[in-house]
Amino acid sequence: MLLRGVLILALAWSDLNGAWARVQSANNATGAAGTTRVVTVTSTAAGSILIAGAAWATATARTISTITDNKSNIWTVLIERSDLTGNHNGAGFGYCLNPASGVTTITITMSGNASIGLDGYASEYTPPASTTVTAEAVTNSNTGSSTSATPGSITTTGSQDLVVVMALTPSASAVGSSFNLVDTADGNAYCDRLGAAAGSYNPAITTTSGNWVATIGAFIAAAAGNKSRLTLIGVGFWIWPLVQLPWF
């Protein structure tokens, strides 16, 4: 009997660029009044990204004036928002790309004294390998008074974004939409989502009832040279008899 067969190979591509990772987080969030707040992060790695956030309450409207550090890194304020009623609550954050390595002391300076309270937060992230990180041109902010603080929707375009939320809240306890509630010192909420696919994001932060201010922004990791591997994951054979018809 003659046999005919087909060799079947099962192949899979795997991404070798890796993923976002949160290396460390720190805060200086006692609720004390002040014009500046200093937050220190340790063993900063070259090629990472630093995020510095602030939440404040004051009788007079304030904004983030500058973010600086002891390494002369370049900082940019990405998004901030103040509630122009009541106690002028506010929140916002900035970033530093590719900081110098070592212990980094970050100073957040306001436009004036935050007479009711000023809190500072910082996190370090490493992006996927062989990628270039930039701030994506999508931010939003929102204010309200309820038990659910939402920063407003943004739509990202990257395939693996870092999305950050900084919010002043009465007492944050949870966050939705697969975000991580990283820091709740002094009742506020610093949140992130690592490796977010392109899409719309507006996470809801659960808090006790009261006034809140929430801000959101994103960072895109664009492949500078995609690294992938083709892997053989299975082999199979399909065999069937060859039927030979007689000649007439």
Image (cartoon, rainbow, N blue to C red):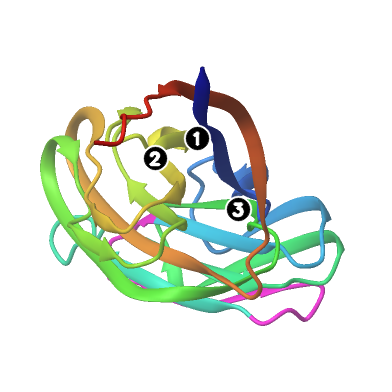
For the residue pair 19 and 205, the one nearer the viewer reads as: 19
Q: Circle 2 sits on which residue?
A: 188
Q: Position of residue 122 (x, y in %)?
A: 60, 53
Q: Does the stretch in magenta take in 58?
A: yes
Mark 1 touching mark 2, by CB under 8 A?
yes
Q: Circle 3 sits on which residue?
A: 122
Residue ID at (56%, 25%): 236
For the residue pair 94 and 222, the one nearer the viewer reads as: 222
Q: Position of residue 190 (x, y in %)?
A: 44, 44
Q: From the viewer's perspective, is 116 left or right of 21?
A: left
Q: From this viewpoint, is residue 82 visible? A: no
Residue ID at (57%, 60%): 51
Sequence-first disc among 1 and 3: 3
**Which quadrant holds the C terminus?**
top left
Identify the secondary structure beneath mark 1. Answer: helix
Residues shaded magenta: 56-74
Residue 47 sits above or below residue 37 on the image: below
Q: Position of residue 222 (x, y in %)?
A: 53, 71
Residue ID at (48%, 24%): 238
Q: Badge 1: few (under 14), some or many (20 or more) residues near its Cα, within 10 Å?
A: some
Identify the secondary structure beneath mark 2. Answer: loop
Which disc, if any, is residue 185?
Answer: 1
Sequence-first disc among 3 and 2: 3
Q: Amino acid at mark 1?
A: Ala
Residue ID at (81%, 66%): 46
Q: Position of residue 189 (x, y in %)?
A: 39, 40
